[in-house]
Amino acid sequence: MNTSDEIEVRHRILIIDDNPVIHDDFRKALAGDAECTEALKQDEAILFGTQETGRMDFVLDSAYQGEEGLAKVKAAIAEGRPYSLAFVDIRMPPGWDGVETISRIREVDPTLQTVICTAFSDYSWSGIRNRLGNSDSLLILKKPFDNIEAIQLANAMTRKWLLNRRAEAKMSDLERMVAARTVELQTANQQLRREVDERAKAEEAFRVIFQASPVGITLMDPQGRYVDVNPAFEQQHGVRKAQILGGDCTRAGIIDAESFQALLRNLATAGSINGQEIAYVHPEEGERVALVWARKVVIGDSLHNLGFLLDITARKRAEEEILRAQKAAEAASKAKGEFLANMSHEIRTPINGILGFTQLTLGTELTAEQRDYLETVESCTTSLLTIIGDILDFSKIEAGRVELEQTSFSLRGCVEDACRALEATAQQKGLELSCSVATGEGDMVIGDPHRLRQVILNLIGNAVKFTPSGSIRVSARTQPSRRPECRVELSVQDTGIGIPADRRADIFEPFRQGEGSTTRKYGGTGLGLAICAQLVEKMGGKIWVESEEGRGSTFHFTVVLRSAASGNSLGAERAWGEDDAPPLSILVAEDNRESQTLISTLLRHRGHTVTAAATGSEALAALEHQVFDVALIDIQMPEMDGLEVTGRLRQHELTTRRHVPVIAVTAHAMKGDRERCLEAGMDEYISKPIDAKELFARIAAVVVPQRLAAAGTR
Ligand code: ADP
């Protein structure tokens, strides 16, 4: 359909009449000079905003029968240039009459304006109306017609047609616009509906998550009043949502006001809370613990606090339970360790006696058979002592009862000493034992020479034990490190049986041995390397092994010591050789008869004079009445212990103005013993079982400086 702007204003008029004269009359009247009705034009201008002026143009067509007229109307419509008006004669023999023609034409073009031209009344007006209906697009023109009348009719009817068409077109423009707008609105509406649906689904999903979450979720206003809580929260806290909404957790008695205010403050300052632990109260289950996460969120246009609470009470209780069990296990293990330490100590004292006296007896005149038996006793006792020593050491380390000494010593001396100690054993097996020490200027160090020696001895001992033939190489070197620290690297390499790869990781664990068959063949407790590992760790280092089965093993370890200036106590120990030690007057205060005899005999064999005391009071009395070069005082003695004896001696010395060096003799090296002894005024410290060499070194260490000082003052 045309739009309102496209409608042509040159009107086509069809004249249907069987009389050609009538056609001419119309042509003369209409085609000549048809006047435009100004009023109609003005109406049109007002209605459609058009600015047409000037004459109205008519284009006339003729048809001489009704059927022909209908055909022309159809053709004009098909062409898109329909007629505005048709003048139709009422009588047109032999074809359709005017009424029939108009009614047929109307079927194809209902908008066409029609004028029935009639000479005399074939039909009455009401007859025509009855046939064609009451229509404002049908007029009657009486023949003979007046030209003006025809022009007026043509103008009015065509103008009316035009206005109708334009109104229709305008209408259809509007309908099109409405339809387009409707489509737009429908699309927008569908989009909106989809968004609403999606939002509803998202809200539903959030609601489901909120409801089903096993973690408690709360929404609070900035003042900390509950706005919403989920079922997990209700369950966790044993409250109903309706009870607490609008109130805060202090009102529901969930947490105390102070903790709650602290939480709110934290949230305000940090902006969030991440996994903070809080204690809260459940009405039936009592105190519980939860982890809290909180965030500030904006909902609508107001600020809220969103909180998540995870109840960790069960986990916390399980942890506490584990901790309790662990403490109990540790206590049990400590008790076991203490028991082992005490037992092995108790066993070691008599064994020590056996060994000492065996050695003393071996120094007397014996038959070859007796010597042989006694040497067997000595060797068995030495093995037993080693095993007991290992167990004691291990349990002492386990119980945390081993304190490292801090004495200055020569690293070279320590390593070479250890090698010398096992040289004979290696030689007996036909093994070559070599020792290389590259310590340079860092040879003097501060640390525990006895424990370091113990580790080296253990490794060389193992190397000798597990090497049927070949050699053992011990090497030590200091590594440059930040003074005063001194890092020492040591290794013991052998050409022995090696260690299977799957056992290498285990051998530093207590009671683990290479494999069943070697254990049976070589014996041992499986404690040696465990002790080494723990001692090395205590000395700030680590131990590891490289090994190849059948080719040998190399044990490496490191320790961190402190560098020391030369001219130390070990220097003093070495100031006296075995033969040039001067005879000394020594007090031996010891309540254990065997130990007393053993120490006294060792000293007397060296040419020293020994005075023995069996109790603390006896010792003090002797010290107050006699002059000694050195006193060996046992810590644990009846009546008065060694610490008290020393204290009183030091008091007494304030008047005599002499200083008798005191060496503490302790049963077992308890943590802090050394410090306690030195604090009590003792000068040195030696633990049982007494090693003869160590005993003489300690005596030299306290007596030599005194002698040197005395010589200097003389
Ligand atoms: P043990 O008292 O059995 O010697 P250790 O703790 O000293 O206990 O050693 C544990 C195990 O490590 C030994 O049983 C042995 O199998 C293995 N082992 C230690 N040193 C060597 C070595 N130098 N060569 C081969 N195997 C070794």
Image (cartoon, grey):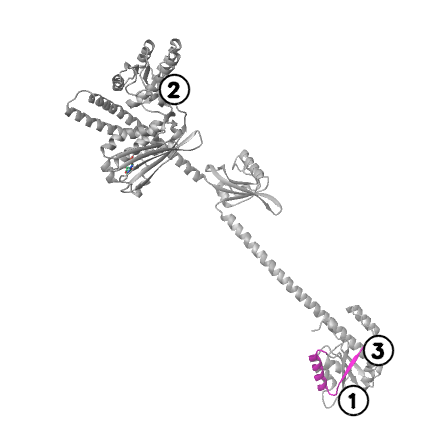
Q: Position of residue 134 (x, y in %)?
A: 74, 77
Where ligand 1 lies, by quadrant? Answer: top left
Q: Is residue 407 left or right of residue 247?
A: left
Kind of residue sitting beneath label 3: Glu
Task: In this rendered view, identify the residue nearer to me: 460 or 543.
Answer: 460
- For label 3, the residue is 35
Amino acid found under the numbered disc labelled 1: Pro
Q: Left of 678 or right of it: where is 343? A: left
Inspect this view and state whether residue 664 appears.
no
The disc, 1 or 2, on the residue closer to the chain's N-terminal end is: 1
Give neighbour class at mark 2: few <14, some 14-19, many 20+ (Cα, 10 Å): some
Instruction: Determine the residue positioned at 22% across, 21% down.
Output: 360
Q: Which residue is mark 2?
A: 678
Which of 681 and 408 lies nearest the eye of the viewer?
Answer: 408
From the top left corner, tell me how far across and down residue 319 is, in percent: 42, 37
Secondary structure under badge 1?
A: helix
Residue behind label 1 places its C-beta within 8 angstroms of ligand 1: no
Dot 1, how many residues are within 10 Å of its Cα: few (below 14), some (14-19), or many (20+)?
A: few
Which label belongs to residue 20? 1
Bounds of the magenta segment? 56-81
198 relative to 349, above or below: below
Q: Is residue 171 magenta?
A: no
